[in-house]
Image (cartoon, rainbow, N blue to C red):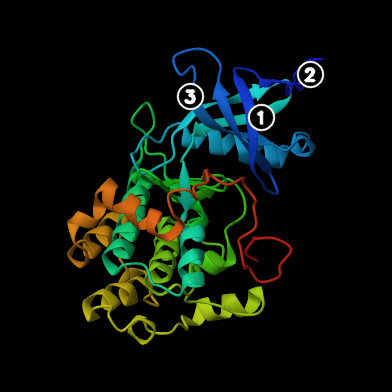
């Protein structure tokens, strides 16, 4: 007697997308791997990000999600995650993004720490430079009429920088981005992960400088595998940030050149006017400190493959807005008070 075939899983369809699997869930949204069913991108595998159903009746959450979609759709840069579609369907708000198949930087740093090996110096500096170049584009991006968008990311951190298995580097998650209009902040309170907030952000002041400070924290981590500003509580972290108490780079990693340590020290200067004026200037200051050959997709992919192995690949996508930072001090949220 022949056996009947096993029952097939029901196909889950959301608009023009077949939902394949869950990639992640945070405090505001859930992200799925999905397949495009029809149109110019038929057959593409994408990341489908949906606002949690419980938040669809919360005007603030809907506004935050819609702002991410609006801003991200206007950004077109090789080092920024591309938004392909966004909208609302049957009361569910969604964003469709390119799927970055690889790892986020937080996973890479964690693996390095577990294995007790630092990132190659050239590679660490190059990643910092690419992050700054993506920020330089976002800070100067213009709208369809040529108007300056005035975007500040506000959540630059290792979990939002993705490295694909083919060597692409992408900045994602503009979910808490803010817009500066005539020098004034639009879009609500200051948000971001505690370890990456600038002294000025702690005072409620937000400008592109906030992203440059956070990028410096990320660069410090890339070079040392340690965060510069730490503490057992959020307030202890904030006190360390305000006082700029951090261990010198060369104390943790003696092979860091003095000139590179000086670049980081300038970016952490007490007065904002003593720091780099723009992300572009900061990126240019890093250029002499790496070999350009490390920036090829083949070389980038080789570093990631060496850490994780060719058979240990998982998709990394822009994490759901509101997802907590790994290893964050106990706090009811990531809101700077």
Q: Of all residues shown, which one is farthest toward the front?
A: 1
Q: State the residue in front, 10 or 154.
A: 10
User: For the residue carrying disc 3, how many other residues have a C-alpha within 10 Å: few (<14), some (14-19), or many (20+)?
Assistant: some
Residue 276 on image: x %, y %: 30, 65
SS label for mark 2: loop
| Mark 2 / mark 1, whichever is N-terminal | 2
Residue lying farthest to the top in this orientation: 39
Q: Total of numbered circles in the picture?
A: 3
* Marks 3,1: beta carbons within 8 A: no
Instruction: Name the secondary structure under disc 1.
Output: strand
- Looking at the image, residue 286 lies above or below residue 12: below
Residue 242 at what x, y percent from top left?
51, 78
Picture disc at residue 197: none
Helix or strand or loop: what does disc 3 sit on?
loop
The CA distance from mark 3 to mark 1 is 21 Å
Question: Which of pointers 3 and 2 lies earlier in the amino acid sequence?
Answer: 2
The C terminus appears in which quarter of the rendering?
A: bottom right
Q: Check disc 2 and report the residue beneath it.
A: 3
Nearer-N-terminus badge (3/1): 3
Residue 261's image quarter?
bottom left
Residue at 46 percent of width and 19 percent of height: 41
Q: Label 3: which residue?
A: 44
User: What residue do we see at 65% from left, 73% from top?
Assistant: 234
Q: Quadrant of the N terminus?
A: top right
Q: Which residue is mark 1?
A: 93
Q: CA distance from mark 3 to mark 2?
A: 35 Å
The answer to whether residue 314 is above or below residue 194 is above
What is the spatial separation of the Cα atoms under label 2 and label 1, in whole angstroms?
A: 43 Å
**Label 2 packing within 10 angstroms: few (<14), some (14-19), many (20+):** few
């Amino acid at each position: 007697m022949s056996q009947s075939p096993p029952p097939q899983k029901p196909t889950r369809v959301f608009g023009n997308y077949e939902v394949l699997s869950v990639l992640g869930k945070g405090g505001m949204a859930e992200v799925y791997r999905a397949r495009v069913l029809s149109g110019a991108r038929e057959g593409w595998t994408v990341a489908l990000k949906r606002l949690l159903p419980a938040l669809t009746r919360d005007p603030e959450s809907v506004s935050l999600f819609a702002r991410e979609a609006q801003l991200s759709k206007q950004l077109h840069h090789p080092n920024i995650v591309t938004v392909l579609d966004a909208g609302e369907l049957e009361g569910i708000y969604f964003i469709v993004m390119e799927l970055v198949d690889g790892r986020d930087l937080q996973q890479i740093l964690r693996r390095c720490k577990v294995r007790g090996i630092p990132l190659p110096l050239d590679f660490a500096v190059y990643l910092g430079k690419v992050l700054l170049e993506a920020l330089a584009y976002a800070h100067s991006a213009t709208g369809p009429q040529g108007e300056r968008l005035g975007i500040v990311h506000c959540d630059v951190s290792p979990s939002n920088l993705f490295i694909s298995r083919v060597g692409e580097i992408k900045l994602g998650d503009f979910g808490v981005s803010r817009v500066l209009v005539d020098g004034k902040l639009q879009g609500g309170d200051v948000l971001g992960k505690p370890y990456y907030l600038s002294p000025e952000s702690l005072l409620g002041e937000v400008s592109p400088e906030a992203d440059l400070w956070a990028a410096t924290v990320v660069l410090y981590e890339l070079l040392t595998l340690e965060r510069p500003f730490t503490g057992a509580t959020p307030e202890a972290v904030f006190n360390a940030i305000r006082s700029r108490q951090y261990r010198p780079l060369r104390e943790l990693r003696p092979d860091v050149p003095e000139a590179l340590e000086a670049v980081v020290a300038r970016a952490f200067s007490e007065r904002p006017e003593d720091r780099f004026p723009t992300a572009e200037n900061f990126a240019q200051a890093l250029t002499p400190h790496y070999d350009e050959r490390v920036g090829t997709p083949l070389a980038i992919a080789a570093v990631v493959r060496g850490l994780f192995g060719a058979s240990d690949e998982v998709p990394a996508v822009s994490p759901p807005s509101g997802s907590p930072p790994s290893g964050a001090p106990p706090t009811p949220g990531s809101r700077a008070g």
